[in-house]
């Protein structure tokens, strides 16, 4: 990857990040989790995490969850993964929530800098019988 492409990618990433912050400046969220990663082989890794999510300027606990995932890396920069999240508590909803996700990411390191691009497709299941598609990048 040439340096010109890297500058273009960095510009696009910064533009998207600034526009998201500008649009959501009144809604500050905090995600706090503890995770354990284990390398199985050169390219395979598994992880487990428990965590919580706060919103409304970090005043309201919205979720408590547990998550497991498996990841495969290749060519030093690329990674694909699958995750399962079980939301134990969801406020204001009290129903349990399941989330299944597949994502692909690309990481580029340059000296002390690291640029990451990630696309994720996920399905949420609420109450055990309804699937709600949701995509985020």
Image (cartoon, rainbow, N blue to C red):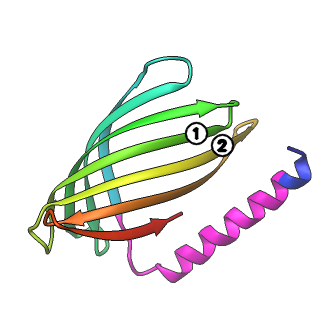
Q: Main secondary structure of the magenta part?
A: helix
Q: Give x and y (percent) for residue 23.
A: 52, 82
Residue 114 position (above or below residue 122): above
Question: SS for tag 2?
Answer: strand
Local crowd at mark 2 within 10 Å, few (<14), some, or many (≥20)?
few
Residue name at image x 32 percent, y 73 percent: 57
The residues tagged by marks 1 and 2 sit, at their Cα atoms, a distance apart of: 8 Å
Residue contact at pointers 1 and 2, CB within 8 angstroms: yes
Residue on which disc 2 sits: 107
In percent of width and height, residue 34 lies at 29, 39
Is 93 one of the magenta-colored residues?
no
Which image quarter: residue 130? bottom left
- From the viewer's perspective, is 59 left or right of 40? left
Q: Residue furthest front?
A: 129
Q: Which element type, helix, strand or loop, lies under badge 1?
A: strand
Which disc number belongs to residue 79? Answer: 1
- Side (left or right) of 125 relative to 26: left
Q: Is 108 above or below relative to 122?
A: above
Q: Looking at the rendered structure, which numbered label has been put on residue 41? A: none
Across and down, in percent, residue 99 comes to: 30, 56
Q: Which residues are magenta?
A: 6-29
Q: Nearer the viewer, mark 1 or mark 2?
A: 1
Quick one: quadrant of the C terminus? Answer: bottom right
Picture residue at 30% right of the left edge, 45% below the top: 33
- The picture quadrant where one finds residue 111 is top right
Total numbered badges shown on the rendered structure: 2
Q: Nearer the viewer, residue 56 or 108?
A: 108
Residue sitting at x 59%, y 47%: 105
User: As rendered, which of 4 and 75 lies closer to the eye?
Assistant: 75
The picture places residue 91, in percent across and down from the top left corner, at 15, 70
């Amino acid at each position: 990857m040439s340096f010109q492409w890297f500058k273009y990618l960095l510009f696009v990433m910064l533009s998207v990040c600034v526009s998201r912050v500008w649009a959501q400046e009144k809604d500050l969220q905090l995600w706090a989790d503890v995770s354990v990663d284990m390398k199985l082989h050169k390219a395979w890794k598994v992880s487990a995490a428990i965590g919580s999510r706060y919103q409304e300027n970090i005043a309201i606990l919205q979720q408590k969850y547990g998550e497991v995932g498996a990841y495969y890396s290749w060519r030093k920069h690329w990674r694909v993964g699958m995750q399962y999240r079980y939301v134990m508590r969801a406020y204001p909803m009290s129903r349990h929530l399941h989330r299944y996700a597949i994502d692909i990411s690309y990481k580029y390191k340059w000296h002390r800098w690291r640029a990451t691009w990630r696309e994720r497709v996920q399905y949420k299941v609420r109450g055990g019988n309804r699937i709600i598609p949701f995509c985020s990048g």
